[in-house]
Image (cartoon, rainbow, N blue to C red):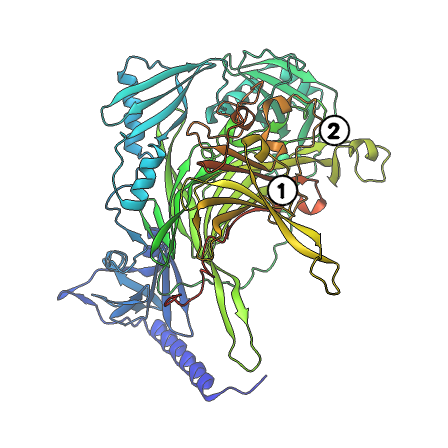
Amino acid sequence: MSPKTPRTRRSAQRLRNTALALAVGAALGLTAPAALAHGAPAKMVPMKKTLEDFGASLRWDAFSQVYTISRNSTLVRVKPGSRSALVNGQPLQLDVPVTMRSGQPFVSEQFINQVFQSGLDKTFVIERTPSPLNPLTAEEIQATVDVLKASGRYRPGYRFTEISLKTPPKEQVWNFAMTGQPVAAPRQASFVILDGKSVVEGTVDLGTRTVASWKAIEGAHGMVLVDDFASVQEAIEASPEFAGALAKRGITDVRKVVATPLTVGYFDGKDELRQEDRLLKVVSYLDVGDGSYWAHPIENLVAVVDLVQKKVVRVEDHGVVPIPMKPNSYDGRELAERPAPKPLEISEPEGKNYTISGNTLRWGHWNFHLRLDSRVGLVLSTVTYNDKGTKRKVMYEGSLGGMIVPYGDPDAGWYFKAYLDSGEYGMGTLTSPIERGTDAPANAVMLDAVLADYAGKPTKIPNAIAVFERYAGPEYKHQEMGKPNVSTERRELVVRWISTVGNYDYIFDWVFSENGTIGINAGATGIEAVKGVKTRTMQDATAAEDTRYGTLIDHNIVGTTHQHIYNFRLDLDVDGEANSLTEIDPVVAPNTRGGPRTSTMQTVERTVKTEKQAAQKFDPSTIRLLSNPSKLNRMGNPVSYQVIPYAGGTHPIAKGANFSKDEWIYNRLSFMDRQLWVTRYNAEEQFPEGKYPNRSSKDTGLGQFTQDDQSIVNVDNVVWLTTGTTHVARAEEWPIMPTEWVHVLLKPWNFFDSTPSLRRVPMGD
């Protein structure tokens, strides 16, 4: 060990003296003098419990003798005995100092109000003019239901798959975002009602409190609702036929069986199901008390539940496969606990670099609106970049459009599994509250959301969205020989949302960089859906057949091969709405100018004319740009954004759906097989799989949107990017799967005149 410097020796002595003083004080029962507030003794309360009850965290730094308090966007530092504190780096005079009693800190009962209502936290600012895109409040959701009940149309038993904001016309919203002019359109709520197996959609005018539209949707099957989960469980527990099938497998207590409600798809009658019935298929698992029923599949047994009758109408039993019974908890409770890692602290002592006004967030040059939708989850709107004082349009709206998780096993309990998670279940409704310090870093600001449940009741989702800033490596660096180093850090702002759909948890990050880049990262974690098999090891005689459609990841457990395919709807408006899709191909061309070289590198550029031409597989060697031909940067190049559906990932990429072309799924969905789609803007075209995909027999999404093959040259366009992975299971993903990521990227391409992240402001050209 190296000898201590004078400074460290003094620090060590100071720590010993402080510790000794506290120990002596505690031993003698000494307390600090009574604190006074406004001339009267203050009522003192325990600091730790008071702050934790308030939702704040408290940490003591013995070296600096400072308490650090953090709650969402506020960070406070205070020394015992001091009359001042630092709130986000700004000094605040305290009426009463922190007082030590028997070695424990006490504060006045006014401490929280004084510190957290000091006005020194500038992260949240008052929204002076509400955005027309602000989601419905709890009061507006309740008003929508009240209007429907008062209209004479409402009947008992109605259930809601959606109550959400009906967004005003796009041009009015952009005008508000760019100039602050309020929209003229009335504030309205959209609703979708399930009446048994019938679907009704409409709108309510919240200003006049009237039903503005009401329309029955013929032939549609609505979403699966949360209360359907309970109906399915009750149905299998009440079914004698299902109980008989369980008895063959040695299960006598049906209450230990966990039902999973699964959509049935469409197979043109080959599955012997009537198209007009509202049905779910049930694959079950046995709860053995280890905390992970997913590890104990009841294989080859499927129940068909009619959701209108709320009973099992068919049991499909294809033979007994032994249930894997070994305890297999996904939280590792049966394992020895590892030593906890040393703390990793992220500190923002002077507060945040962003502000949130209502639902509008401003960070550096970026400005955008965010909200949570019950179907697609996080929606970002009116995204602009302030370029040297000029607010420039980048994207009107961006969100997950839809996704599908298709499995490749043809067996009875698997062939129908091709979940449209957002379109059939509603991924926003299934939002998973974000845990600080694990799901998001400690410096994250958490935002709550309010959605309507199936009964139309406003429901608060705490910590639905996390916002945080992070270091992301060097933004640029250059070391000229003999000269000072020139470099700067890259900062990123992340907006995170997580949805849990059954066994899988999906993490979606929107990542903004100061250089104008927007990344979309989709992460899959949670627990794989596994199949029970006879095989214990790959040396068993049964191994080849049991692993034909997957990987043996534990004794008697196969992780079935499947895909996670995401489609993102990106209404890009690159410096305005008149955009075109441009393609640039690097090519090898002959050298015609002499010299020793025989070839050159050049580029060939072309404009894609129509929607059908734009729908294509992604070739990473081709540069694809959404360009604005009428806007040029100072060199005369059209301003553009590059669109990249595959920007790296950790699982093998899904080049398309792994199905033959005669599968019925291709009649229902087109978005899986093309990574790039561009359609002319239509406010009604929101979902790549169509609005009502549950049990659909044909494509009412992108396949239909592109049928008229409209021109996409110099018009208002929407880009749809499909990305995803083919998930071939591995042992390292069991019993719980580390997050596997795929990445989409939107990158400025001649959008700026120079590097936009330079720390210095240009003085002139």
Work out whether 701 lies above or below 86.
above
| Type of the residue with mark 2 | Pro
Work out whether 680 lies above or below 342.
above
Q: Give the image quarter of residue 212.
A: top left
Q: Is residue 1 left or right of residue 326?
A: left
- Label 2, secondary structure: give it: loop
Q: Residue at x 26, y 69 (%)?
A: 84
Q: Residue at x 82, y 35 (%)?
A: 543
Q: Is residue 62 left or right of residue 742?
A: left
Q: Is residue 165 left or right of residue 528?
A: left
Real-space Cα distance between discs 2 and 1? 19 Å
| Type of the residue with mark 1 | Ser
Q: Name the residue beneath numbered marker 2.
A: 322
User: Which image quarter is the C terminus in?
Assistant: bottom left
Spot the residue most to the left: 39
- Label 1, secondary structure: give it: loop
Lower position in the chain sequence, tag 2 or tag 1: 2
Q: Name the residue beneath numbered marker 1.
A: 329
